Structure formats: structure tokens, C-alpha cells
Image (cartoon, rainbow, N blue to C red):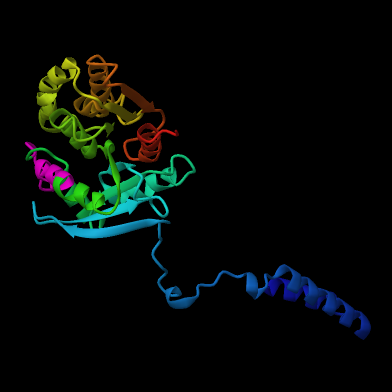
Amino acid sequence: MRFEYTALMRTLDGKSSWSRTRLLLAAVALMLLLSPPSSLLAQATGNEAQGGAPVVIARARQYDIKSKINGLTYRVMILAPVNADPAIAYPVMYLLDGNATFPKASPALNRPMPGNAILVGIGYPTDDQSEFRRRRFVDLTPSVSKTPVPEKTGGGDAFFRVLEDEVKPFVMARYHIDRTKQTIYGHSLGGLFVLRALFRNPNAYSAYIISSPSIWYNDKEVLRDEEAFSKRARVGDLRLKVLVTSAGDEQYRGADPKLLAEGNAGRMVDNASELADRLALLDPKNIPVTRVIFPGETHGSVQGAALSRAVRFALPPE
């Protein structure tokens, strides 16, 4: 306002008293017009004025439960229909890495269709990203890593028991669940976990959603169970569906030799495509397989698109 004040004084200089009064009143009116009224300024109120308040997901609830299987505490996040009817058996979708995936998937489930389903995120009671990373490396890997990594690994089989013997019963004690419509979703190491669950426990879920799976882990050891699964599938006694997704840009295909070597080592897209092709041939009628690649997305950015597609795949509008 200093510039406007100086210009005004120069304009008033040499004017008559009456002219100066009119100009001054006009200038004050203009300044008031251009200045936002205090009622329009954003102000924090209540006890949250200083530090803010936590963001809340509508209709969601969270519970911290301690596992008797591995002694660790997990955060179970649940989004259920309003006034869930105990007479209705609801489909349920379980999300690994719940701290990251549950907030992203919730808006997709909140749309009008399908609203009659339950979303469950399994995560950790922490907002510390390093702790979140440490915990997931333990829970989502099937064995101890052969190559040195900063985090502990190899707790995947125990974590699967946590899901089956503790998390599922916890949810079922609170809601009437349709046991024939249960889905599990995992991304990256979570995709590796879901793939192992598919091969070893194909009757645990009706839909397996494998997002950007880390098939490369420990020299592709997860694929050692594929033949046994394939034999069961060819008999025709399995009823399930599979979605395999990838980000188009998560496997480098450029000219840089170093980056190309790294991309070929992980083969994030190629491994997933080859897996989907093999699974699609087993029993197309009873085990339909869908393959989706999201162009222009990276391994980190793809989760929004992958989760949106996952909800539509697992819970299609009726």
C-alpha cells in the first residue's frame, strides 16, 4: 500500500481543499473495495487452530490389533456401507500396504456403485515412512533376501497366517461377509505376496489382484510354485479370477546401457506379461485372467490407476 499512498499524496498536492477531500474519499473507497473483508479470510478455529486436525475418511474406522502369531501390531482400516445390514452378505476387498492403499481406494468405493461392499486395509500403527518400509519388507517377502538389503525380510508366510487366522475373523466378527466374494490386492512386494498366495492358497480368495509384482525377488523363487498350481488349475476345480497390472514406464527401454541392464534385470513389465499369458491358458472359463498396462505411469505413480481398476475388477456394478 505504500506506493498507492505516495501516488495519492502527489495527486492531492496543489488541489483545493474541496477537491482534495473528494479525491481522498474516492481513494479510501477504492482501497476498501480492493481489500478482502476479514470475514473472507481463512481462519482456523477451535483446538486445531495451531497444529491442524487429522484428515478423516468418511465412514472409515481403524483398529490396532496385536497378532498372536508373530507378536506384531497391525492397523486394520475398514470402510463399510452406512448402516450395514446384518442380513446382507457383503463382498470384501483386502488391501496390503493399507497405510498407502486404503486412502487411495476409498474414493473409488464411495461412488454410488458398487457401494454395498467392504474395504479393508492392513497396515501399521505409524506415520513414520521408514518404519512403514521396514515392516512391509518383513511381511511381504517369502524368504530372506539373498542380496544385502537394509531391512529384514522373509516374514511373508507368517503374515499370510495373520491375514487368514486373525484379520479375516476380526472383520467377520463385525460384518456379514460373502465368503465367495473375497479379493486381495498387493502392489510391488505386495504383488509378489499376492502371487505366492495365489499359487499356494488359491481357495483363500475369489479374486487375486497382482499389481507390478516383484517377481524378480530371490531369482524368481515365487515361480517355483507355479507348476503345482497349474496342475490344480488344469483339473478344473478352481474358481477364481486374476488381474495383473503394470506401469508402462516401470521397465526402462531406452538407450542408456546401465539403465537398460537394470531394467532387464528386474523385467517388471515383461515378467508380469509373461506370467499373465501363462495363467490365461490354464482354464479360461474358470480362471479368467485380465492384463492391464497403464501407459505413462511409473512404479510409484501407478497406484491410483491400479487401485481404481482393481475396485472395478473386484466389485463390478451389478
Residue lying at the far front in this picture: please name it.
87
Most foreground residue, 213 or 288: 288
Measured as percent of width and height from the top left, residue 52 is found at 42, 69
Q: Is residue 86 above or below residue 261?
A: below
Measured as percent of width and height from the top left, residue 160 is found at 14, 42
**In this rendering, would 53 be left or right of 277?**
right
Q: Is residue 137 above or below residue 127?
A: above
Most foreground residue, 279 or 316: 316
Q: Residue at x 36, y 45 (%)?
A: 88
Question: Visible in this render: residue 308?
Answer: yes
Most foreground residue, 191 or 236: 236
Residue 199 shown in magenta: no
Q: Residue at x 43, y 43 (%)?
A: 108
Name the quadrant containing residue 255: top left
Residue 154 shown in magenta: yes
Measured as percent of width and height from the top left, residue 16 is found at 93, 83
Write the start and end of the magenta stretch as one range: 145-164
**In this rendering, would 224 be left or right of 106?**
left
**In this rendering, would 81 be left or right of 19?**
left
Q: Is residue 281 above or below residue 98?
A: above
Q: Quadrant of the C terminus?
A: top left
Measured as percent of width and height from the top left, residue 196 is found at 16, 32
Q: Is residue 59 above or below residue 277?
A: below
Name the quadrant containing residue 287: top left
**In this rendering, would 167 be left or right of 144?**
right
Q: Residue at x 39, y 47 (%)?
A: 106
Q: Residue at x 24, y 16 (%)?
A: 283
Q: Quadrant of the N terminus?
A: bottom right
Marks counted in the figure total 0
Question: Visible in this render: residue 254?
Answer: no
